[in-house]
Amino acid sequence: MFKNTRDVLNQIYQPLNEKRIELRTKLAEAFNGLKITDGFYNGHYHRNSAGQYQADSYPIPVISIMGLCDIEIDFDGITVTTKLSKNRIESFNWNNLQDVCFEVYGAEDYLTDYGNNRTIDDIKGKVLSSIEKEFFISFSLSVDSITEKVINLLNTLQQKYFYY
């Protein structure tokens, strides 16, 4: 049984690990002034078919760019997680990122959703009425996204005062 399980796990994880290596190499070139680390971590959440957050027990590759973001490489996509302060969210021009899907959720209460499938005005209204001072923003990309698309997103985030 273990041999078969190991073979299955290797088949599942090999593409994720290859994507991690590819991204890590290109990110080190593009952001050579920032500390970049990576590893495999569990404890992530995803939305299940009922739209609720569900914890995952299995580890996925995560690349951390210190001070900017975490990049999570999962089986069904790449997520770039970063933060923005309340006042920056209020003044941020979301049109800069209109071609990227994103979620906004609390930094303290990370299961409170402020921006999934809402208009920009709805997001700003919920953020302004919140007691939270900063918010996580997770940008979702296809697992097949080319590295340059990820780097372009990160450059935009860095220029617009996102942090982690």
Image (cartoon, rainbow, N blue to C red):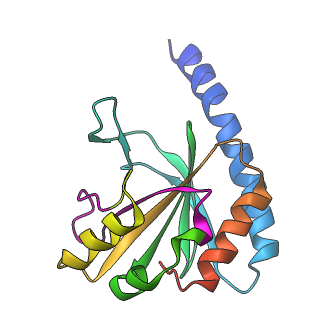
Residue at image location 79% in from the left, 60% down from the top? 148
Residue at image location 50% in from the left, 81% down from the top? 163
* Range shown magenta: 96-114
Residue 103 magenta: yes
**Residue 37 falls in image quadrant:** bottom right
Query: Left or right: where does residue 130 sit relative to residue 42?
Result: left
Q: Nearer the viewer, residue 42 or 69?
A: 69
Q: Is residue 87 above or below residue 58?
A: below
Q: Is residue 83 above or below residue 149?
A: below
In percent of width and height, residue 138 lies at 47, 60
Residue at image location 56% in from the left, 79% down from the top? 66
In percent of width and height, residue 39 lies at 57, 57
In percent of width and height, residue 28 lies at 76, 72
Residue 34 magenta: no
Query: Left or right: where does residue 105 sit relative to residue 93?
Result: left
Asked whether the viewer can see residue 19, the reply is yes
Residue at image location 80% in from the left, 64% down from the top? 26
Total numbered badges shown on the rendered structure: 0
Q: Nearer the viewer, residue 12 or 100?
A: 100
In percent of width and height, residue 101 lies at 53, 53
Asked whether the viewer can see residue 64, the reply is no
Q: Nearer the viewer, residue 33 or 3?
A: 33
**Residue 115 falls in image quadrant:** bottom left
Query: Left or right: where does residue 58 sit relative to residue 151?
Result: left
